[in-house]
Image (tube, rainbow, N blue to C red):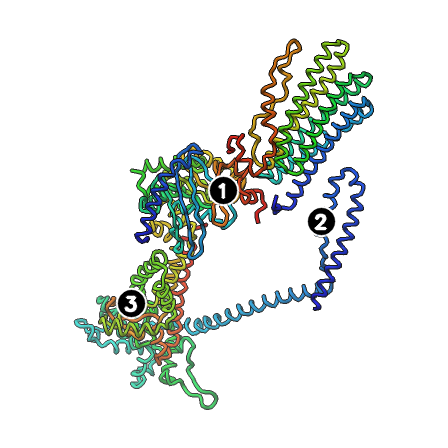
């Protein structure tokens, strides 16, 4: 993977990031869940992200906004190493999850993805029953000792995802038979079931109608009590509604990051202002 | 406003809102001016006209409110656009109050038309009126030009109005104590002066809004207090002007340009 | 030049139109502008801007040119439709001709002429101690003569000749029947024997009793003379001749005699060969495809392998036969003519098909499903085996079945490894015993000179086509049944 020199550089970077990471999230009052430093991402020769350093607070919602192709999704996918799937994708920089370097062998990617759950743009339940959809994660990670425990996990996950009342009578019906909004909540339940610390959401409501969107947003609001949530969204209004902090990406660079209320009323950067007021381009 | 919106209608609507505000501002200022002229010349007719003018101001306020609500509902403005719309609502409100207060002065003119106030009193009132009118015009200019520094300057100059009001207050008290026959007239004049002072306060609110639109920040300074009337009693004169003079001194070096706004030493750091 | 001129002219006219609009607009605005001095400027400029944007030239949709154009476009539409329809009709006609000629030739083979006769099983002829040595030909001959008029019994020459009416296998069929039921010895039994092939054909009306025309008319020599034809007609009059469904076509092994030849050997051989082929190629193909698609690094080597798999699918099958002959039989010493070597050769041929179909099916699994699996922390192999493979399975099965169907119809490579053995007995067929398969059986029959094999060849082709249709139907059914809805 890396040659020795690179690994060395990385470890020193990580140490440095660990040291300075403590104070970075003090602004929000909470702890830092993710500390990322000098992130560069390449797709083959093309650089997609340029030197992004961002701290993500725990028990809060961080929204990543920006025009299409600005690198916000790419950045999000670095946080649970989803980019590993793409052969030509190369990630540089330091990512610390609770002080552990996720790219440097501290955490196995398989376990990382259990700890950092993900919800995708298009609802993508497994073509299996609702129960199996939620039970799959706990089962492969061995989180339940027996069937009753598994059933318990499924129920609590579905309850947390505000779906239990709608599906409790048809747990063994296929998950793909639910409506779009229900499917997305099923995916959230599936992500919750592995008891993650972080939930990444890649435009979770972009394929849903306003009512289903409102349900998801309400859910996000509830979930942030216990999880660190990072959400990528194209809808400025959505970012304004659900997030505590907002980061604006443009052409692979982090232009501005700050409390959501500040970003949406008085952004510091002209580029941010132009984008969120619809003057971009 | 280096760039235009992608949706051109958005730009147009914002522009219309702004021009409405400016129109309303000028109307309110004109109203104040004619009320002051009517007061000076004891012209009841002009005062009547002034009162009628206020209706137009009220109407404009409704129109602006309607436009702003439509804009929020349909365009969901954010950042500077949001600030512009919210400020438009607030400024329209303040201007409407300014118009009302001017109307109130005009009403008193009708009542006072037969009376003849002593000369020094008239002079003081005229001076104060001029000051307030300049404030109103200044605030409007700051809005039109989106000039935060000018807004801040006008905001600070409200202290002068307050001071003028304080001295008017003292003067009028003195007159009333000297000659009880003047009490009726002086009370009316006192209320007139009070209205002017209130207009000055509304102007500071307009300035605050203008400053917020332009910079995205609130004026963090302590408001200069020139109005000492709350502490004035006719029985004795407390010597409490030291504090006010200090404020006046700090208020003078105005013009903090927008770029330096964050670094102003008088302000606690924003955000 | 001319274009520029046109452009300039257009600009001019547009500009003048705009001026006019603006003038009108300002005229209209005049009373309004008195209301607010500052607002009128804005209003005026925006309305003129709108006017410029609205000044789009309207298209005359009803002009003659436009209508003519529309007609032409519709005509082109219709033409295309009819050409396509014509192509379909042509293809259907060709297929129809093929099938109808096969049916025409082949249906007669699905029925077989039998002659019911009474046989006197005299013990001295039957030879009860060792029935295999019994004089069965004589019993059959006597049975025949008994049914015929006196003259056939008198004439020795004729009496000898009548045996040609029944199949040469008739004495053996009678013997086997009696050997199974020894209590019949000494009794006179009624038994149906096969007619000889020429009389079977004659009975079905395929060959005439008299050939040539006009003065050159002569009796058909295949039928052995007019006396035998007359004897057959007499048997027919006695209602002894019947034509039931020919189960023997499916349950008899191959034979030199058309009337007794059946496909049982070929069907069993094909089944065994396909079994070997499936067992080898299905798991190998799927695993190879999974590795290539999911695990292999994308580099020159895997690209090279991929290209070669695609090439392999296009290699003529006879080449695989040669390879099988040289490698499996020549080098590894696998017994020739056997389902084992045949299946191995066919699996070489089906492997690329299965690999390609599997890879396509795996590729068609939406990436969102992979992301979903990985997103909850599934490892790569869990993702593949728990989620991707089940979803891809219908596609894989379809591909595999189509590959098998291809293998079922393959002839050339099997001929090369000697899989056209003559199998008169199906009782001792096995993976390592010589065997034949349906297509090579068809090939052998088509080569045989006897008239009866012509219709049997067509019938065998119909049987083969029937198997292929069944397999393809199975593929479609599997796809419908197990494909998941998204």
Q: What secondary structure is marked by label 3?
A: helix
Q: How far across and down, in percent of the image, does residue C117 sit?
A: 32, 73
Disc 3 with disc 2 on a shared chain: yes
- The N terminus of chain C lies in quadrant: bottom right
Chain designation of label 3: C
- Does the image show residue C33? yes
Name the residue at 37% across, 60% down. Answer: C298
Q: Mark 2 to mark 1: distance in Å?
A: 38 Å
Return the residue at label 2: C50
Return the residue at label 1: A256
Q: Nearer the viewer, mark 3 or mark 2?
A: 2
Pick the front one: C28 or C459: C28
Image quadrant in which you'd find residue A25 = top left
Return the residue at label 3: C344
Taking the image as shown, residue B55 lies to the left or right of residue A144, namely right
Q: What secondary structure is marked by label 2?
A: helix
Q: Nearer the viewer, mark 3 or mark 1?
A: 1
Chain designation of label 2: C
Q: Mark 3 to mark 1: distance in Å?
A: 66 Å
Q: How far across and down, in percent of the image, does residue B268 sit?
A: 51, 30
Name the residue at 76% across, 50% down. Answer: C22
N-term mark: 3 or 2: 2
Pick the front one: B163 or B138: B163
Q: How far across and down, in percent of the image, does residue C427 sit?
A: 25, 67
Image quadrant in which you'd find residue C273 = bottom left
Disc 3 with disc 1 on a shared chain: no
Q: Residues within 10 Å of mark 2 (few under 14, many from 20)?
A: few
Pick the front one: A105 or A178: A105
Taking the image as shown, residue C469 lies to the left or right of residue C168, namely right
């Amino acid at each position: 993977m890396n040659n020795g020199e690179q690994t060395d550089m990385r470890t020193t970077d990580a140490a440095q990031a660990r040291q300075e990471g403590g104070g970075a999230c003090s602004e929000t009052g909470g702890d830092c869940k993710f500390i990322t430093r000098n992130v560069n991402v390449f797709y083959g020769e093309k650089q997609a992200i340029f030197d992004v350093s961002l701290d993500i607070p725990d028990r809060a919602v961080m929204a990543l906004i920006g025009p299409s192709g600005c690198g916000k999704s790419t950045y999000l996918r670095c946080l649970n190493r989803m980019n590993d799937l793409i052969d030509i994708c190369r990630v540089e920089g330091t990512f610390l999850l609770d002080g552990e370097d996720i790219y440097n062998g501290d955490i196995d990617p398989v376990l990382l993805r259990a700890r950092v759950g993900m919800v995708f743009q298009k609802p993508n339940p497994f073509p299996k029953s609702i129960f199996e959809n939620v039970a799959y994660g706990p089962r492969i990670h061995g989180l339940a000792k027996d069937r009753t425990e598994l059933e318990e996990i499924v129920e609590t996950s579905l309850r947390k995802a505000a779906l239990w009342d709608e599906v409790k009578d048809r747990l063994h019906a296929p998950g793909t038979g639910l409506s779009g909004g229900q499917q997305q909540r099923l995916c959230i339940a599936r992500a919750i079931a592995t008891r993650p610390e972080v939930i990444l959401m890649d435009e979770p409501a972009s394929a849903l109608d306003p009512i289903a969107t409102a349900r998801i947003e309400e859910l996000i609001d509830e979930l942030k009590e216990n999880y660190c949530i990072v959400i990528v969204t194209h809808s400025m209004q959505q970012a304004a509604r659900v997030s505590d902090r907002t980061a604006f990406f443009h052409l692979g660079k982090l232009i501005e990051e700050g409390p959501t209320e500040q970003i949406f009323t008085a952004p510091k950067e002209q580029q941010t202002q132009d984008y969120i007021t619809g003057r971009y381009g | 406003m280096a760039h235009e919106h992608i949706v051109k209608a958005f730009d147009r609507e914002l522009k219309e809102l702004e021009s409405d505000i400016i129109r309303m501002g000028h109307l309110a200022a004109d109203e104040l001016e004619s009320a002051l002229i009517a007061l000076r010349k004891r012209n009841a007719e002009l005062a009547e006209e002034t009162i009628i003018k206020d209706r137009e101001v009220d109407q404009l306020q409704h129109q602006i409110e309607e436009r702003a609500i439509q804009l929020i509902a349909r365009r969901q403005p954010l950042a500077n656009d949001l600030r512009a719309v919210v400020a438009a609502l607030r400024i329209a409100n303040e201007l409407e109050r300014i118009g009302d207060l001017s109307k109130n002065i005009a009403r008193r003119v009708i009542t006072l038309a037969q009376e003849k106030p002593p000369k020094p009193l008239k002079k003081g009132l005229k001076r104060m009126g001029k000051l307030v009118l300049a404030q109103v015009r200044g605030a409007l200019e700051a809005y039109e030009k989106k000039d935060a520094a000018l807004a801040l300057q006008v905001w600070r100059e409200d202290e002068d109005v307050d001071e003028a009001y304080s001295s008017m207050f003292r003067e009028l008290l003195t007159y009333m104590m000297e000659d009880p026959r003047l009490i009726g007239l002086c009370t009316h004049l006192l209320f007139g002066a009070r209205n002017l002072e209130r207009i000055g306060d509304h102007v500071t609110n307009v300035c605050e809004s203008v400053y917020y639109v332009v910079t995205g920040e609130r004026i963090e300074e302590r408001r200069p207090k020139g109005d000492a009337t709350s502490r004035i009693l006719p029985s004795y004169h407390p010597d409490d002007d030291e504090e006010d003079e200090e404020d006046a001194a700090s208020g003078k070096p105005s013009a903090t340009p927008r770029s330096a706004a964050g670094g102003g030493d008088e302000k606690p750091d924003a955000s | 030049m001319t274009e520029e001129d046109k452009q300039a002219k257009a600009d001019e006219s547009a500009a003048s139109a705009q001026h006019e609009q603006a003038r009108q607009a300002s005229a209209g605005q005049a009373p309004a502008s008195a209301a607010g001095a500052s607002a009128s400027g804005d209003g005026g400029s925006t309305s003129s801007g709108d006017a410029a944007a609205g000044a789009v030239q309207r298209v005359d949709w009803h002009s003659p040119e436009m209508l003519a154009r529309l007609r032409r476009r519709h005509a082109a539409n219709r033409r295309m439709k009819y050409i396509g329809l014509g192509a379909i009709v042509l293809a259907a006609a060709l297929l129809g001709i093929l099938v109808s000629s096969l049916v025409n030739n082949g249906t007669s083979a699905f029925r077989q002429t039998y002659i019911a006769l009474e046989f006197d099983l005299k013990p001295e002829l039957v030879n009860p101690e060792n029935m295999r040595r019994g004089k069965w030909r004589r019993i059959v001959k006597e049975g025949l003569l008994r049914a015929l008029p006196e003259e056939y019994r008198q004439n020795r020459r004729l009496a000898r000749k009548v045996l040609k009416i029944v199949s040469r296998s008739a004495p053996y069929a009678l013997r086997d029947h009696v050997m199974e039921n020894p209590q019949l010895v000494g009794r006179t039994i009624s038994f149906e024997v096969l007619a000889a092939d020429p009389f079977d054909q004659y009975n079905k009306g395929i060959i005439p009793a008299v050939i040539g025309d006009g003065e050159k008319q002569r009796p058909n020599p295949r039928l052995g003379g007019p006396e035998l034809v007359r004897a057959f007609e007499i048997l027919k009059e006695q209602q002894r001749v019947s034509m039931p469904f020919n189960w023997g076509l499916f349950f008899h092994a191959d034979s030199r005699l058309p009337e007794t030849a059946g496909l049982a050997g070929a069907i069993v051989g094909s089944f065994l060969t396909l079994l070997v082929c499936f067992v080898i190629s299905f798991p190998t193909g799927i695993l190879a495809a999974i590795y290539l698609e999911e695990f292999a690094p994308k580099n020159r080597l895997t690209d090279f392998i991929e290209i070669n798999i695609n090439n392999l699918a296009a290699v003529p099958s006879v080449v695989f036969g040669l390879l099988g002959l040289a490698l499996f039989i020549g080098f590894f010493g696998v017994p020739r003519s056997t389902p084992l070597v045949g299946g191995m050769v066919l699996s070489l041929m089906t492997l690329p098909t299965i690999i390609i179909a599997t890879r396509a099916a795996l590729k068609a699994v939406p990436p969102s499903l992979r992301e979903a699996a990985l997103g909850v922390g599934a490892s790569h192999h869990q993702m593949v085996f728990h989620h991707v493979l089940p979803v891809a399975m219908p596609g894989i099965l379809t591909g595999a079945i189509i590959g098998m169907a291809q293998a079922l119809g393959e002839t050339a490579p099997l001929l090369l490894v000697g899989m056209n053995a003559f199998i008169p007995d199906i009782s001792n067929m096995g993976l390592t015993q010589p065997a034949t398969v349906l297509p090579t059986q068809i090939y052998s029959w088509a080569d045989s000179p006897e008239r009866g094999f012509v219709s049997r060849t067509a019938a065998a082709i119909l049987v083969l086509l029937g198997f292929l249709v069944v397999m393809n139907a199975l593929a479609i059914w599997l796809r419908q049944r197990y494909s998941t809805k998204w």
